[in-house]
Image: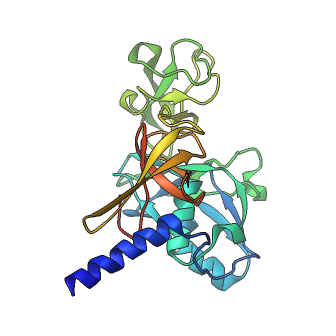
Amino acid sequence: MRADRQATLVLLLVLVFCSTGALAVDSAEKLTVTLYGESQVSSDQIFFREIAHITGEQAMVERIGQVVVAPAAREGRSQRVTIGHIEVRLRQAGIEPRHLLWQGATEIDVYTKASGAPVVTAVPLSSSSSEGMDRQQIPSPPDRLENYHVVVARATLARHQVLTRDQISLEEREGIVPTHGSQRLEDFIGKRVTRVVPAGSQLSLAIVEAPPVVGMGDRITILAEVRGIHVSVPGRALATGAIGDMIRVENTNTRQTMSAKIVSADTVQIEIGGNSF
């Protein structure tokens, strides 16, 4: 029995690496998904409905909205969820991402609300109430103004400049506390900015990212593991990404493409049958 079980797992790995077609899924052709640039959650899981505005057939909207796309960060912290990661979770739920009409952001900064923080509502870009907000969060009216800290640039920062401690500083301000609470220098040091930031401007987690370690076209090793069985094949990166990012990769032996998580500068790992990385 044990040998049969291992043979089944090996076959599963072979199918993942060598198959030429996608898994069978339910059609969701009439659904439109608008991803927010930022969102906020209060539980230990991130549901698709919390990071996207979904329109279409109600039954499918509810089904897709209940898909868990990732574990949430700790209270008061944030994490970035990419569209590649979302695609993996949707396929595991039997939903083919190619049947969806995608709009909005390609990655989402998701904040986990700290205990006692004000409740906020995510607003889709297409909503009339979000005009000029550019997918920002709208906090509920506060009872009083409070002091909080923000991170600002000491000097003008060039696009893709990696942040060091001497380039940024903390400033205390009074007003409506942002949805993500006070900022910390530690959340920015070592990351790079995605656009030019003028001196004195406030930084946000939406405009910084981890420096990429894999570039588009790089040769990589694709790994898979199921219950102690390891398989590796040569591959090629189809996108740029940092450690922890989900990107599309190609198995150079079979030309099969798949989503995988970057674990080092030359290695990615795929997820099989719900097993975590």
Q: Residue furthest front?
A: 253
Residue at the image point whose x is 55% and y is 11% from the top: 155
Residue 29 image point, x, y percent: 75, 76
Residue 95 image point, x, y percent: 60, 75
Q: In the drawing, does residue 108 fall left or right of residue 132?
A: left
In which image quadrant can residue 120 be found? bottom right
Front-most of residues 128 and 5 = 5
Residue 235 image point, x, y percent: 51, 49
User: On the rendered image, what quadrant is the N terminus found in?
Assistant: bottom left
Residue at the image point whose x is 72% and y is 52% from the top: 130
Front-most of residues 45 and 201 = 45
> Does residue 204 sit above or below 273 in this rendering?
above
Any part of residue 273 in sight: no
Q: In the drawing, does residue 209 fall left or right of residue 60?
A: left
Any part of residue 74 in sight: yes
Q: In the drawing, does residue 151 fall left or right of residue 60?
A: left
> Does residue 183 sit above or below 87 in this rendering?
above
